[in-house]
Amino acid sequence: MPPPGVNAKDFSDALKQFEEAVGKEWVFTSDEDVALYRDAYSPFWGEPEERVASAAVAPYTVEQVQAVMKAANEYKIPVYPISTGKNLGYGGSAPNLSGSVVLDLKRMNRILDVSERNHSALVEPGVSYFDLYRHIQERKLKLWVDVPDPGWGSPVGNSLDHGGGYLQPMYRNHFDSHCGMEVVLANGDLLRTGMGAMPGAQTWQQYKFGFGPWIDGMFSQSNFGVVTKMGFWLMPEPDAYLTGTVSVPKYEDLIPMIDILTLLENSGISNGMPGLGSPILGGFMMPQRAPEVTEMLQKDGVESASLHKYAQDRGIPFWSCTVKFYGPEKAIRAQWEYAQEKFSAIPGAKFKDDEFYKFPLTPDQFNKVHKPEMGIPSLEMFSIGARSPYNPTPGQGHIWFSPIIPRTGEAVLEANKVFAKAAKDFGLPLLSFSLPTTYWMRSFIFLFGFPITHDIATNKKNRETFKQVVRVAAEHGWGEYRTAPAYQDAVMDTYSFNNHALRRFHETVKDAVDPNGIISAGRYGIWPKHLRETKA
Amino acid sequence: MKCLFALTFLALAGQGFAADDATIQKGEKVFDYWCATCHGPGNLPGTVALQTKYKGAKPALLSERTDLIPPVTKTFVRKGVSIMPFFRKTEISDADLDALAAYIARNNKAPTR
């Protein structure tokens, strides 16, 4: 089945050119092969609206990518580049526009450079976090890679999608930690950014900006080019790692606790990803919640006066914060001591030493730790959705609702009220209380998983609900940082300042750099001119 | 003449076993690279899932199973199951999948093909 708007002869001629470029065995057109490009966690699974590819082409070199793009541009074939195609929950390997040809870059899996002196790497899109980690380990280099929870993704793809990890803040934001990229444009032209624009430059992975406007951001969460190389800054292996937990007694203490945490992080004192918790409410890595606490929560919510009294009478802290430190032992012990001084401003604050490790880890420690916090890729995060004694009847996947909210205690409390009401209004399982994750230094993200099933009616209901919560969040000024193709238009609609000036700008750029609109049509709500006209 | 036939047979059989060993070794590498991160020893999601499902009636570790014939392994890899997605041919090629399936089936009592 040809892509939309492409006749059968042009499609056939383009596929022949793709075959000439990459070899016949790397152009996939059979139903069986193309089905492998479905999004395994698609919220449209099995419905006519499911976004599916018409074919796939898998180049091995940059020159092959250029040849494919030239042919696609000539025949106006929509293509959808993927790196490893493993961002499950955010779209996987399926295109936004059904009928697109997936440009599968998995075979481009070369680690082109790893520098122990510069603490950097240069990789192709098909390289996974596991690959980069193994490469470093085999060479016994003292370097850590900041990895997202599932380690089978691509540093290139994950950073372009604004993914995050767990190490020091300058590495945790994966797009921030990149330095230099190579991009194939819609017409097959080849571009390098930053210092890479200068032939013979020795500093492509040392200085991001080169000369003139810094355009790297335009290739993230977008459809303006096909990124074929990216440089990354890696974290030098630290001497040691230390964590300690502060707990504070009262409900209102959340506000100063977060303010102090933010000060410590923005000052560089706490340099690991902190963890927020609530000993009274229980939850992940916390004691199990007492049944009477659940009753009080269900009756009056987290503001329940009887709940506050219950906690106070039993001496159970309302909130906790685990702060984390990487560095020389002497330094991080002093940093933890300083952090305790600062948190002591909250009456009744208590402190507990948690983990302390020196590197390399012993095998026992290796098995015990949360691996991404040590720069070790893993797939252990899938334990959350997989079959287990706690989850005997697993679903088919998940999709994340992940709004950015302000980094204040007030916002955490307000967001919980708003989302609890939304859950009630839209018939979602009631969230008694949820604390945000702390990937970014300057803001919080709430992460809520929506289940994916193979039941059409359930998925349909969940899709509608997802859009409703996106709308409710936006009404409070909280926007999604990333979302699956199914919701990208709805989310982009919420970034609507001055009559959607941002989207209009994206469209202007799109029309200029990809006039035939062939790259990832619709990705992150950016549609090429001919499809905007059809949609209107 | 009989002797010659016997030698030829043994030689071919030997070649056959050698090829199978190489395939199984290749399959083990594919398993270690693609599968062991979820289905290896320890508290990993795939291993816990199979332990929960079979409650010890079958080994939780895929590498210790003796009942998975190649078509079954191939179906799981190409179709996925529960939250495990399917794998594309740029990830696990057909040749790699043949080897992987042979590795998983290496201890089967019934025919492995």
Image (spheres, rainbow, N blue to C red):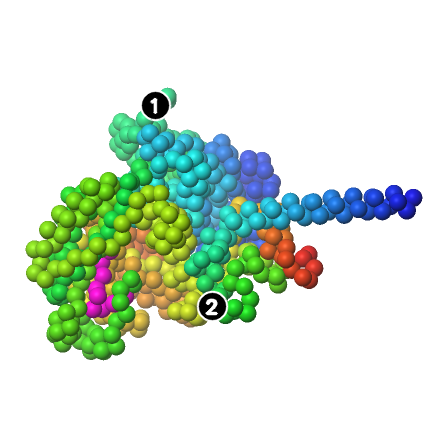
Nearest the eye: A359 or A434: A359
Dividing the picture into quadrants, the one containing residue A466 is: bottom left
Residue lying at 20% horizontally and 77% vertically, measured from the top left = A296
| Residue at mark 2: chain | B
Nearest the eye: A107 or A14: A107
Dividing the picture into quadrants, the one containing residue A208 is: top left
Side of A455 relative to A322 (left or right): right
Residue lying at 48% horizontally and 56% vertically, measured from the top left = B41
Q: How many marks?
A: 2
Please name the amino acid that badge 1 sits on.
Ala
Please name the amino acid that badge 2 sits on.
Thr
Q: Position of residue A104 (x, y in %)?
A: 48, 44
Name the residue furthest top.
A200
Nearest the eye: A70 or B95: B95
Above-or-below relation of A535 to A461: above
Answer yes or no: are tags 2 and 1 on the same subunit.
no
Label 2: which residue?
B52
Report the Cα–Cα distance between label 2 and label 1.
55 Å
Helix, strand or loop status at disc 1: loop
Q: Position of residue B79 (x, y in %)?
A: 54, 59
- A300 is within the stretch colored magenta: no
Give the residues in magenta: A274-283
Residue lying at 38% horizontally and 43% vertically, measured from the top left = A155
Considering the whole magenta stretch, tell me its main secondary structure: loop
Helix, strand or loop status at disc 2: helix
Label 2 environment density (alpha carbons within 10 Å; few <14, some 14–19, many ≥20): some
Above-or-below relation of A516 to A93: above
